[in-house]
């Protein structure tokens, strides 16, 4: 490689523009520190005439992003368009096929095509950087790709979606409803007009699938992850969880116990004073539990122009230093397709039902739970609390003793068939560890 890194950038939105501005601003410092020159040889986006936050005319414009990957003068292509198919996909494969370095912030692309990308990058000995695809400015990929390479990882637990964390924080700290908190997130520019992937857990699951690959030698895939979103959480759940000493957070986790690997995105009760419990608003956090280092905690900005651009630039530096890691820490022949385990690990659950104000309702409820092997540790039941249109039902909140997920599923199926309750019960896992 020459001493000049010649870069093509596709996608000039929030992150693409941020990368260009940051590279221009920090160019001389980076060049002094790393002894390489960084030149942007071409840029591309949908519309040349769109107003941008930097001067487009100082760079060569490419009408088609794919032409950046075909240009023999360009060494390194940075994809900041998004999506797991179409332009982003074509650009990735064309760049690697042409032995160029490829950097992306696109979790959907890495998650959906990790297997092919991993094989192709090995056969062409190409660099693929994707630090910005998980947790924005937090260097979690680098930590897992090289930082803890000799340690044995038992589990990773993270808050990986800033929008859902903001919503849950506002519900819990400002006593707002889910709908009002979502509206506030949208007004502040934290949530997309269509925030479904943030709320239904899919965004966090894409990121978890990548983290899981790095930790547990599986190709990324969503199918083996159990995914639940935050849409059914009520403001009162936060209040009751806090009475038990917990906050509710959307936790993405991949953890090994015995031979069992659990991969899950779910609203989870975490201890109020723990690292996971104290991270609020749009921040992200990742806790890595290891054999030799104990628990490592990385916390910071999970999205936005500044933090994400900084992660993209750290990949640019890695490329220039000729760093070549396997995409997911191991040779692709040593990675397996994701294993869908039966979840055998027992744990405690938070249960909330709206129970009919009728004689015998409580004993019928506990009978159903008991029949399914669920025993109760703590209960909260207060009269006078109702949902707006459900005057004849009051909330009953329970913490269970440890139980497996099959028992929870079968109790759920049985409960929704009865007229004991007014809306679907929620069962949320409880993380007892102080992470
Ligand atoms: N925003 C964040 O905080 C954040 C954080 C971490 C990772 N990421 C990831 O970074 C990537 C970019 O996100 P972003 O927020 O910067 O998105 P964005 O603001 O929507 O920008 C997307 C860019 O892609 C261009 N584009 C879209 N379709 C195109 C096509 N068919 N051909 C050529 N260009 C096309 C757009 O062109 P025009 O400008 O001409 O419309 C725009 O410049 C995504 O993969 C996202 O998941 C974002």
Image (cartoon, rainbow, N blue to C red):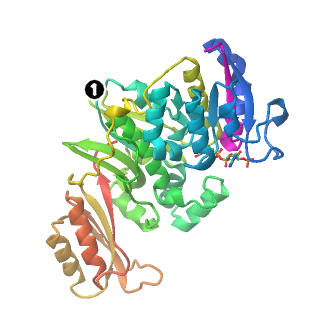
- As displayed, is residue 344 above or below residue 69? below
Q: Residue at point 41% right, 31% down? A: 144
- As displayed, is residue 314 above or below residue 13? above
Residue hosting label 1: 292
Q: Residue at point 20% right, 81% down? A: 364
Is 214 placed left or right of 366 in the picture? right
Q: Counting other residues with Cα less than 10 Å from the Cα at mark 1, is it few (<14), some (14-19), or many (20 or more)? A: few
Quadrant in the rendering for residue 38 = top right
Between 382 and 164, the one lying in front of the other is 164
Quadrant in the rendering for residue 223 = bottom left
Q: Where is residue 371 shown, x and y percent of the image? A: 14, 73
Q: Does the residue labelled 1 lie within 8 Å of ligand 1?
A: no
Q: Which residues are drawn in magenta?
A: 1-19
Q: Quadrant of the N terminus?
A: top right
Is 388 placed left or right of 10 in the picture? left
Between 259 and 275, the one lying in front of the other is 259
Q: Where is residue 271 shown, x and y percent of the image? A: 35, 49
Quadrant in the rendering for residue 181 = bottom right
Q: Quadrant of the C terminus?
A: top left
Q: Does the magenta stretch include residue 15?
A: yes
Q: Where is residue 410 shown, x and y percent of the image? A: 23, 70
Residue 55 appears in view: no
Is 199 placed left or right of 381 in the picture? right
* Count of all numbered marks drawn on residues in the image: 1
- As displayed, is residue 145 above or below residue 35? below
Q: Where is residue 344 shown, x and y percent of the image? A: 20, 54
Q: Residue at point 56% right, 32% down? A: 97
């Amino acid at each position: 490689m020459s001493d000049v890194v010649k870069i093509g950038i596709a996608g000039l939105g929030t992150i693409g523009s941020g990368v260009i501005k940051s590279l221009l601003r920090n160019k001389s410092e980076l060049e002094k520190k790393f002894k390489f020159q960084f030149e942007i040889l071409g840029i591309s986006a949908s519309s040349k005439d769109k107003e941008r936050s930097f001067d487009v005319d100082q760079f060569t414009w490419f009408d088609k992003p794919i032409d950046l990957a075909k240009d023999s003068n360009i060494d390194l292509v940075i994809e900041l368009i998004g999506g797991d198919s179409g332009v982003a996909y074509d650009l990735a494969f064309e760049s690697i096929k042409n032995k160029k370095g490829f950097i992306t912030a696109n979790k959907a692309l890495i998650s959906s095509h990790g297997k092919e990308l991993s094989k192709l990058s090995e056969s062409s000995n190409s660099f693929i950087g994707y630090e910005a695809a998980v947790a924005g400015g937090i260097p979690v990929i680098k930590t897992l790709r090289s930082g803890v390479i000799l340690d044995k990882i038992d589990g990773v637990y993270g808050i990986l979606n800033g929008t859902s964390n903001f919503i849950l924080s506002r519900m819990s700290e400002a006593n707002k409803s889910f709908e009002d908190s979502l509206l506030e997130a949208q007004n502040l520019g934290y949530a997309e007009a269509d925030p479904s992937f943030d709320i239904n857990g899919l965004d966090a699951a894409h990121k978890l699938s990548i983290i899981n690959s790095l930790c547990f030698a599986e190709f990324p895939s969503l199918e083996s992850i159990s995914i639940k979103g935050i849409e059914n959480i009520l403001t009162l759940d936060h209040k009751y969880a806090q009475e038990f000493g917990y906050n509710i957070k959307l936790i993405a986790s991949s953890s090994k116990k015995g031979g069992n690997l659990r991969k899950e995105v779910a609203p989870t009760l975490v201890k109020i004073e723990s690292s996971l419990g104290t991270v609020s608003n749009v921040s992200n956090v990742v806790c890595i539990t290891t054999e030799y280092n104990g628990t490592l905690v990385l916390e910071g900005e999970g999205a936005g122009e500044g933090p994400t651009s900084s992660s993209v630039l750290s990949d640019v530096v890695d490329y220039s230093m000729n760093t070549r890691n396997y995409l997911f820490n191991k040779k692709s022949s040593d990675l397996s397709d994701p294993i869908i385990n039966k979840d055998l690990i027992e744990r405690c659950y938070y249960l909330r039902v709206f129970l009919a104000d009728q004689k015998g309702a409580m004993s019928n409820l506990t009978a159903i739970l008991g029949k399914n092997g669920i025993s109760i540790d703590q209960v909260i039941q207060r009269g006078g609390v109702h949902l707006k249109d459900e005057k004849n039902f009051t909330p009953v909140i329970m913490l269970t003793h440890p139980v497996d997920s099959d028992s929870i599923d079968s109790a759920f199926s049985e409960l929704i068939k009865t007229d004991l309750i007014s809306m679907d019960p929620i069962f949320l896992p409880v993380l007892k560890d102080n992470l």
